[in-house]
Amino acid sequence: MSETGFDLRHSAAAFPAVENRLGLSRREFMEFCAALAATMGLPASAEAAIATAVEKAKRPSVIWLHFQECTGCTESLLRAEHPTLEKLILDVISLDYHETLMAAAGHQAEAARQSAMKANKGKYVLVVEGAIPTKDNGIYCKVGGHTAIDMLKECAADAAAVIAIGSCASWGGMPSTGPNPTGASSVAEVLGKPVVTIPGCPPNPYNFLATVVHFLTFGKLPAVDQLGRPKFAYSRLVHDNCERRAHFDAGRFAMEFGDVGHRQGYCLYKLGCKGPETYANCPTILFGDAGPGSWPVGCGHPCIGCTEKGVGFAKPVFQLATLKNVVPPASYPRIVEEQGNSSFAAAAALAAIAGAAAGGAAMLARNLGKPSEESKPSAPDKAE
Ligand code: FSX
Ligand code: SF4
Ligand code: F3S
């Protein structure tokens, strides 16, 4: 029995071989475990422990609450390009209450929540998606006749761990945007204690999966920063791993959407990119399993700082980011050379290699998903 009460012993009768459950080959499964270990910054030796936990441990019961949000967190988990990610998540956890996904409705749904809480008292993981309206005694969000405040407190009381998924649950996110008429607040604020947060609007599903697998493997949640964010995912600035960083350093900026610089893949800082003040692993883990380049900046849009309290939904999209670790000169020499395909392709290849080292899960996703030729990014000079 682990320190959190989960029984991690092998239960072959209850759990058929993982390959059969997931439709993966043994090799692909081990690649998945290695990728998660790499994502969490764990040594290669952790791969075996992860494999054992995923393969043989009793799946933790998860109660998933929805409050003020758009359900994008859930969608990002389930709308992966290849079906394996969804299968992996649903195989690793036992999702016992989730209003979007469960077949039950009304009293049946309430009964399912109560019975999951009772059967797994002190052992279940509570995942909260969405902010909690606190103004006027919380009347702006009610589920089954209960305010979000009451429901959250009731479910958190007997949880082994609480995870706030998405920026709304982590720090208020979009619903807390000024003037915040409903008093939208974070899970930690309502519970009055720190919780693990996985911000992002939506958050990267691999960060959630890696956090749950860490809990499953080691019986505890991963190390977090002062905002409750797992350090393995939120300790570096987007700017530090961005594939356009060389353009930033060289003073090559897109000045407006669709201009030559934008089409050449230049830095988006002057379009308001908040990468320099936003901590997240988006450039290395990538997003949505849609193939290489599938993250906001990779698609040509400035980072809006969605993982960062005080930046996302707080600073206007066009406002220049605060530079945390580098101050560029006020002016740059004239750019006389043409920036052709080959130099960008080389930079992209280097970024892909960096991604392989730092974001194993994304590389695995690509391999498992085997992105088609059409899903590969077009040459930067053709991007719109
Ligand atoms: Fe939406 Fe989730 Fe944004 Fe919030 O993600 S994608 S509004 S973080 O809670 O559903
Ligand atoms: Fe990338 Fe944005 Fe930094 Fe430019 S400002 S290098 S686009 S993160
Ligand atoms: Fe959000 Fe910026 Fe990543 S907008 S998804 S933190 S690139």
Image (cartoon, grey):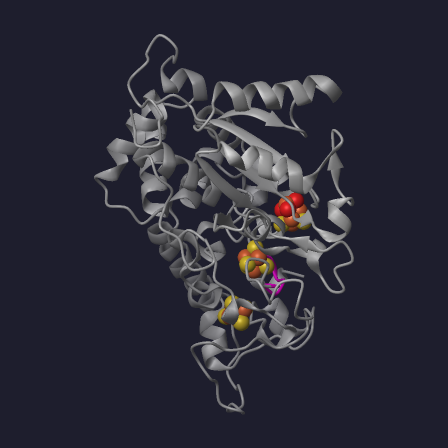
Front-most of 269 and 376?
A: 269
Q: Position of residue 9 (x, y in %)?
A: 28, 19
Q: Position of residue 245 (x, y in %)?
A: 46, 70
Give the position of the N terminus as an image quadrant.
top left
Above or below residue 276? Residue 282 is above
Q: Position of residue 30 (x, y in %)?
A: 31, 31
Q: Is residue 199 visible?
A: yes
Front-most of 187 and 314?
A: 187
Q: Is residue 379 visible?
A: no
Front-most of 243 and 60?
A: 60
| Farthest residue, direction front | 137
Above or below residue 83? Residue 69 is below
Q: Residue at x 60, y 67 (%)?
A: 311
| Farthest residue, direction top | 13
Residue 200 belongs to the span the image colors magenta: no
Per the picture, the main secondary structure of the magenta-coloured stretch is loop
Give the position of the C terminus as an image quadrant.
bottom right
Q: Residue at x 51, y 70 (%)?
A: 277
Q: Position of residue 227 (x, y in %)?
A: 47, 58
| Farthest residue, direction left | 45
Q: Quadrant of residue 334?
A: bottom right
Residue 300 belongs to the span the image colors magenta: yes
Question: Bounds of the magenta span?
Answer: 298-304
Looking at the rendered structure, the number of numbered marks drawn on it comes to 0
In this rendering, would 125 be left or right of 145? left
Q: Residue at x 29, y 26 (%)?
A: 52
Q: Quadrant of residue 309?
A: bottom right
